Amino acid sequence: MVEDNAVIALDLSWRIEHLGHTVVGVAESADEAIPGILDTLPDCVLIDIMLRGDSDGIHVAEEITRRSPRPFAFLTAYSEAGIVERAGKTNPIAYLVKPVKDYDLLRVIKLVREATGEGPGSDQ
């Protein structure tokens, strides 16, 4: 997960774990996130679009897509047209609007499982 607000990151991590899934890491910046993602290769990455620092979550998505593609979903409290248009070009599996609801987390997990061949109708 890439989230620069520690309270939100802790809450989402707890809820994801409570739903029966594992959070393998939390990064607060793009500089911290990209190497961490490439080292752990998680099944899915939740990325806050707006991060502190020089690079935003869209940059993180572009880099992981270029280096080691995997499903990702954006976390956002913003719906500014330019940001949404730029984010959409990275092909996220979903957008989660803050505050994130548990059913939205479950929906993203289902989408990831389907995208990776672990969902309904898969041979695995």
Image: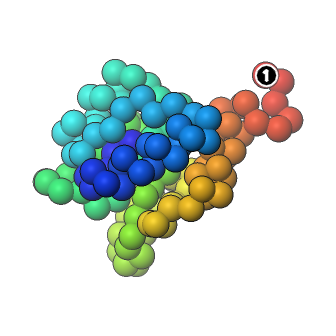
Q: Quadrant of the C terminus?
A: top right
Is residue 103 visible in the rendered image? The answer is yes
Q: Foreground: 31 or 26?
A: 26
Image x and y of residue 52, in percent = 18, 56
Q: Is residue 24 left or right of residue 63?
A: right
The residue under the point 30% across, 29% down is 36
Q: Residue furthest left?
A: 54
Residue 86 higher or lower than 63, as above or below: below
Q: Is residue 77 left or right of residue 43?
A: left
Is residue 61 visible in the rendered image? The answer is no
Q: Is residue 69 left or right of residue 114?
A: left
Image x and y of residue 83, in percent = 35, 69
Q: Foreground: 22 or 67?
A: 22
Image color mode? rainbow
Identity, as a three-letter code, of the amino acid under mark 1: Gln
The residue under the point 57% across, 34% down is 21
Task: Name which quarter of the figure residue 84 lies in.
Answer: bottom left
Residue named by callout 1: 124
